[in-house]
Image: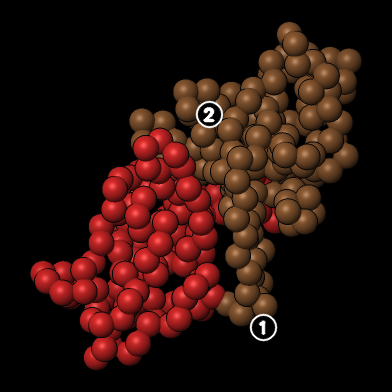
Chain colours: A brown, B red
């Protein structure tokens, strides 16, 4: 899991009606959760319908030197109002610290006081299982 | 589609019983198909059960400069014997030319005369739709 903590870029797969979809995401890691946010779109549509997700974190230097971690995870939305405000704030704080905002379509979310009215949807991915593979020449 | 032709590394998502799975693959491109091979395992188990696949090809230089292509695709196995020997040979030839063999668990397939008895499973991914996104600072 060291790789999960060290990296902030992953590829997230989800599926709706057995049709898979995969996109890059940036995340922050804490405990058994990855935190991320997204603008509304296909990814959220899929994950709201079917919360099962798979996250690939890989580092592919060469054919002789690569490693990857695959996480099975469950999506939980962190609504802008309601019981999980603390987690939403935690997600925002972790992401602010860790992530360089390249994400497609992303604007950096507004500072904390206005985060509740941001169009960004915060979510976590609760890790169910992790499996790693590695080759080192 | 220029990016699809130029790159040889992608992330492949598949789904079985609505559980997604994502792994890195190397591929060779020809027309509306990507060619690849795999050792037996979870990926093939999923794709044989449900041939719908999604392929992500991305180039993420920075938050201001990135591009990605997402392909919806259908998996077709190229059996080691049977009607599609020509395509299997084509796949092998394209992959031999283009791909540096880093793939997890991969040994380079045997030369053509013995490819029929290799444990590697060759397959193609027929592209149904492609959508690209890009940011350039």
Q: Nearer the viewer, residue A2 or B108?
A: A2
Which chain is mark 2 on?
A
List the residue tagged with mark 1: A137
Image vertical order of residue B95 relative to residue B42, above or below: below
Name which residue lies at 73% across and 8% down. A82
Q: Which mark is residue A51?
A: 2
Give the side of residue B96 with respect to residue A38, left or right.
Answer: left
Mark 1 surroundings: few (<14), some (14-19) or many (≥20) residues within 10 A: few
Q: Could you say where residue B77 lies in the image, as x and y percent from the top left? A: 25, 62
Name which residue lies at 33% across and 90% down. B111
Q: Could you say where residue A10 lies in the image, as x and y percent from the top left? A: 64, 49
Q: Are marks 1 and 2 in contact (CB under 8 Å)?
A: no
Q: Could you say where residue B43 lies in the image, as x and y percent from the top left? A: 41, 56
Residue B133 is drawn in which quadrant?
Answer: top right
Give the side of residue A107 with respect to residue B100, left or right.
Answer: right
Q: Nearer the viewer, residue A39 or A82?
A: A82
Mark 2 surroundings: few (<14), some (14-19) or many (≥20) residues within 10 A: some
Image vertical order of residue B22 relative to residue B18, above or below: below
Which numbered disc, 1 or 2, marks the residue that appears first in the sequence? 2
Give the side of residue B84 with respect to residue B133, left or right.
Answer: left
Which chain is mark 1 on?
A
Image vertical order of residue A52 relative to residue B10, above or below: above
Name which residue lies at 68% across and 31% down. A124
């Amino acid at each position: 899991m060291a790789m999960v903590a060290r990296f902030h870029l992953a590829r997230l797969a989800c599926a709706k009606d057995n049709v898979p979809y995969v996109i890059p995401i940036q995340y922050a890691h804490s405990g058994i959760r990855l935190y991320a946010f997204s603008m509304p779109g296909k990814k959220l549509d899929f994950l709201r319908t079917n919360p099962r997700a798979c996250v690939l974190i890989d580092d592919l230097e060469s054919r002789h030197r690569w490693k990857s971690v695959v996480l099975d995870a469950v999506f939980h939305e962190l609504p802008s109002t309601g019981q999980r405000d603390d987690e939403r704030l935690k997600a925002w704080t972790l992401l602010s610290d860790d992530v360089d905002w390249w994400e497609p379509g992303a604007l950096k979310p507004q500072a904390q006081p206005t985060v509740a009215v941001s169009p960004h949807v915060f979510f976590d991915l609760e890790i169910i299982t992790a499996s790693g593979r590695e080759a080192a020449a």
